Amino acid sequence: MRMVEIIAKKRDGGELSEAEIRFFVEGYTKGEIPDYQASALMMAIFLRGMNEKETVALTMAMADSGDHLDLSSIDGVKVDKHSTGGVGDKTSLILTPMVAACGVKVAKMSGRGLGHTGGTIDKLEVFPGFKVDIPTDLFFRNVKENGISIMGQTKDLAPADKKLYALRDVTATVDNLSLIASSIMSKKLASGADAIVLDVKTGSGAFMKTEEDSEALANEMVSIGKGAGRKMAAVVSNMDQPLGLAVGNALEVKEAIETLKGEGPEDITELCYKLGSKMLVLGEKASNEKEAREMLEDAIRSGRALEKLAQFIASQGGDTAAIYDTSKLITASIIREIEAPVSGYISSIACSEIGMCSLILGGGRVTKESDIDLSVGLVLKKKVGDYVNKGEALAVIYANDEAKCREATLRFLSSYSIGDEEVTHQTLIKKEIG
């Protein structure tokens, strides 16, 4: 095969064969195909698109470019969950112990965050001593014995995706449905789960801004997963405002613990029940979502879900004291209220701007080398549809630097729209697929 012919074929709108796609992925991963030819093919795909057959072939080729995690030695259906990300999204911290407490095993690999807050494994490092870089044998043992383990993504997992994403990022070829879906699903498939539940965010604080685009992405990923022999389900959920109330690493961990105690915000509690119910059904522990929800509610009510979190943290070297006393979590030195400048109803929140406030405070990464301040962030007191009086707290800001605190406060105030007209509270679950 010749790379120039593959580029020309896609440029002219042709369908690439599985063999042609594998030739490209394998050659580019090994460094045998130069960046300029890979860039040309990515642009051809961006402009011409890929059909379902091509997208599945690309996903599988990228998944096969490195190691596969073989979970077959672990009994039962292994279920994974993926979120496309958003502001205040700490669902993995809540979902995984809830689901594991109901008897479904969760073996999860997560990456570090790049953006307004840390990723799941950054947040887990709030617990002193917790190790994300654990040997694979310990990862397997923890899943078998405790039903849950989360570790950092290995460098050998779907290396083609990592290399291609870096190229797409600098060649304006990121925003293509097939390329986005294959990027996400190649890592999920290589991670070895039998079933995958997807939480695709939509709105101002999400990667996909419109409900139509988010639904299309969800359908594409479900189709890829089913084509690869996995059990799949997805929801499209609202990200026009932060999920829950807390934004920032330690603050989100605290909110996750509160939710596992049955004391969390209504929206994140409801989303975790919805995603968790789908995980239990796919994991063959419940015959329908109503039965699954009752199981999850019992896991919260009985305290088993919280105990499962503690068991998981301890198994990877973490100090569990803060799970039973959240005042032991790391705390910022500056804590103050952000007051409403006028009275009225919260009509909208520029969700991505709340994320930027966290980044300004030091709660996220600008580059992969950036250090994260785990203690900073915001806790919202008012969300869309709520009424606020002038001078009442819109949020509490947590900071360790006065200048950053002032900058983030101003940014926060500009993100809130307050009007005289009563506003309907937003719908959380926009669509269910699979």
Image (cartoon, rainbow, N blue to C red):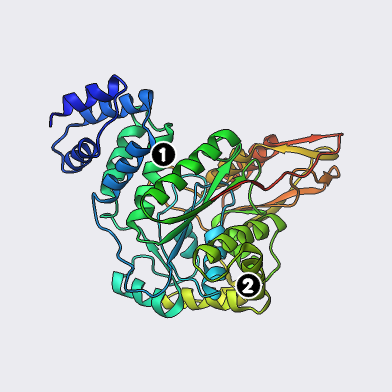
Front-most of 383 and 3?
3
For image coordinates 67% across by 48% down, the residue present is 428
Whichever of callouts 2 and 1 sits on the residue coming sooner in the sequence is 1
Question: Residue at label 1?
Answer: 180
Horizontally, residue 267 falls left or right of residue 59, namely right
For image coordinates 42% across by 51% down, the residue present is 226
- Alpha carbon separation for disc pair 2 and 1: 34 Å
Residue 26 percent coordinates (x, y): 19, 43
Front-most of 10 and 399?
10
Horizontally, residue 368 falls left or right of residue 25, namely right
In this rendering, which labeled residue sits more in front, label 2 or label 1? 2
Residue 91 percent coordinates (x, y): 56, 58
Callout 2–callout 1 Cβ contact below 8 Å: no
For residue 77, which quarter of the picture? Answer: bottom left
In the figure, 406 relative to 302: above or below?
above
Q: As shown in the figure, which amino acid type bears the numbered disc 2?
A: Met
Horizontally, residue 64 falls left or right of residue 114, namely left
In the figure, 347 relative to 262: above or below?
above
Question: Residue at label 2?
Answer: 295
Residue 225 percent coordinates (x, y): 41, 50
Q: As shown in the figure, which amino acid type bears the numbered disc 1?
A: Ile
| Circle 1: element type | helix
| Circle 2: element type | helix
In the figure, 397 relative to 102: above or below?
above
